[in-house]
Amino acid sequence: MQAEDPRAVVSAPARTSSPGEPVVETPGSRIERAVASVISGKADEIRTVLTVLLAEGHVLLEDVPGVGKTQLARAFAAAIGGTVRRIQCTPDLLPSDITGMSVLDQTTGELRFQPGPVFANIVIADEINRASPKTQAALLECMAEGQVTVDGITHVLPTPFLVVATQNPIDMEGTYALPEAQRDRFMARLELGYPDQDAELAMVQAREVAQPLDAVRPATTEQQFREEIGVARSVRAHELVERYAVRLSRATRDHHEVRLGASPRATLQLVRAAKARAHLLGRDWLSPDDVKELAVHVLPHHLVMHDPHARHDDARRVVAHALATTVAPVMR
């Protein structure tokens, strides 16, 4: 069998629109604009969260308090016309506080399922690392399978469904680090960071007399957004582009600083996120650039470093090395 040439030229399908930002008004562009009216100066982060939402993934936001993590999630829920629930994670939070439980109906004498806060389109799990490992694990089935099983009965969660979990990297006392199995369920990890001076000033002025979140109107409906998810899922991917994503993940496994590299689930998440990005840019085919753009958000948090004190930036450096040393196919 002949060895694969990573420098192979891939013939790009005929374009359905011009490359770059979409010039035609789309549900995605309307959602981005609606969220940007609440979160100033974070266009790239907004685009990444929308990409994950279209790719049916989940987001881990790790940043200091007060930079707009919760507002970002609420703005997305308002923009897609969906529901949002917030869970404040604490050490005494129980799994049933998240998933729901069976309660006795006094009128009928029968057990009736009372849905928990996870039954929403967007679920905010604030300070997820303050919840016990048992409670963190309650989110696993929800995030991986889009359902909850209580007393042997399965309840399907609404779609779209996005978990936005937050962590404070500064105050770590009394917290439970997310295990690898839990981190693996998140498609992307983001840091919002502080806004620049002009964006922070615009935020202050916008909130002097009103709350911008109250002015957000749905840019689409749940049904329309579900259709957008289906279109993003059907984006065509050439085998060589898929092989490129696989080689990137495998390159992280071979790095000398890494004890556990990106999992096959991470590779699948990378391709799905890249397809969603292609759709947002008005294409129905996948480009290596889509994979490159999302790799820095999708792969690093899947890595387990040999150094127990390694930071997320160290994992990002490993992914950057994989991107620099892995030859991408050429599209033309």
Image (spheres, helix red, strand yellow):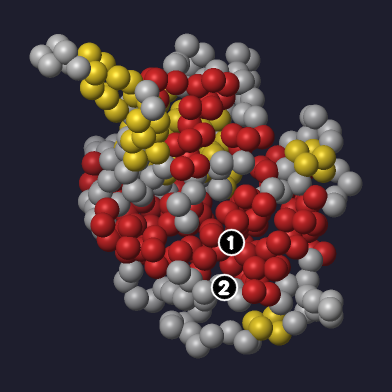
Q: Relative to 14, is 208 on the left or the right?
A: left
Give the camera-side residue of 71 and 148. 148
Q: Which mark is residue 156?
A: none
Q: Are marks 1 and 2 in contact (CB under 8 Å)?
A: yes
Seen in the picture, residue 330 relative to 130 is either above or below; the reply is below
What residue is at 12 percent from the left and 16 percent from the top?
108
Residue at the left extreme, as displayed: 107
Where's residue 140, x and y in %? 51, 34
Where's residue 1, x and y in %? 84, 78
Q: Amino acid at mark 2?
A: Ala
SS under mark 2: loop
What residue is at 28 percent from the left and 46 percent from the top?
82
What residue is at 46 percent from the left and 43 percent from the top?
145
Give the camera-side residue of 261 and 205. 261
What residue is at 63 percent from the left and 35 percent from the top?
181
- Tell me which corner region of the image, top left, top right, bottom left or bottom right, holds residue 213: top left
Q: Which mark is residue 271?
A: 1
Q: Is residue 329 visible?
A: yes
* Residue position for label 2: 237
Where's residue 233, x and y in %? 46, 64
Seen in the picture, residue 277 relative to 198 is either above or below; the reply is below
Q: Amino acid at mark 1?
A: Val
SS under mark 1: helix
* Label 1 – label 2 distance at C-alpha: 9 Å
Q: Relative to 123, is 321 on the left or the right?
A: right
Q: Earlier in the sequence, mark 1 or mark 2?
A: 2
Q: Relative to 37, is 302 on the left or the right?
A: right
Where's residue 57, x and y in %? 49, 49
- Tell me which corner region of the image, top left, top right, bottom left or bottom right, holds residue 203: top left
